[in-house]
Image (tube, grey):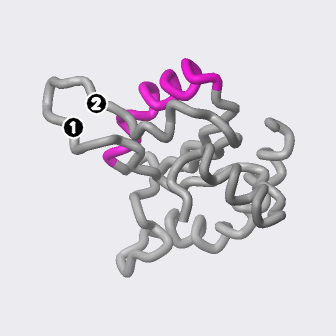
Amino acid sequence: MPSSPSSWRKHLRDNNIAPPDGLIFFSPNLLNETPEAGKTHRYTAELNNPYLPVYIFQPEYSPHYWHLQALSEHLQSHAYRFHIEKLPHVRDGYPLRDDRTPVETALRERTGALLRSAMEKLQKIQ
């Protein structure tokens, strides 16, 4: 499969496939490597080349939540069209957990509605 934005565009064009409206992430780990304490982290190189709008759902009780401001600044500095929706009182992987809290259980039941809403918002930030 293609691994870079330009190779994806070529793949879509060569195979007469309509491009997606955007990318939706749930608690993404977009760091290039495991960050070392006290050192600046780097994002994957794919985040340096915007080609689709991005919608991010970020659980509050996730280690990636603490990098949200830096991620937002990185996306802005690379001219991304994006939206970040914080999920309060929710842990990473909440839909698959056996030990879900009542808040996580309720959110899991609304995941389809969350995705539909994100798809609609992606079309508006094109």
Place residue 43 in its image quadrant.
Answer: top left
Helix or strand or loop: what does disc 2 sit on?
A: loop
The residue that disc 1 covers is 35
Instruction: Answer whether residue 1 is magenta in the image.
Output: no
**123 displayed left or right of 7:** right
| Residue 66 coordinates in the image, percent (x, y) | 36, 35
Q: Nearer the viewer, residue 74 or 69?
A: 74
The residue that disc 2 covers is 41
**102 displayed left or right of 36:** right
Place residue 90 in its image quadrant.
Answer: bottom left
Is the residue 79 above or below the residue 15 in the image? above
Look at 49% across and 25% down and name the residue there.
74
Q: Which residues are the magenta region?
A: 63-79
Q: Amino acid at mark 2?
A: His
Instruction: Answer whether residue 77 is magenta in the image.
Output: yes
Look at 69% across and 32% down and name the residue there.
81
| Residue 62 coordinates in the image, percent (x, y) | 36, 50
Going by the picture, which residue comes out furthest to the front? 14
Q: CA distance from mark 2 to mark 1?
A: 5 Å
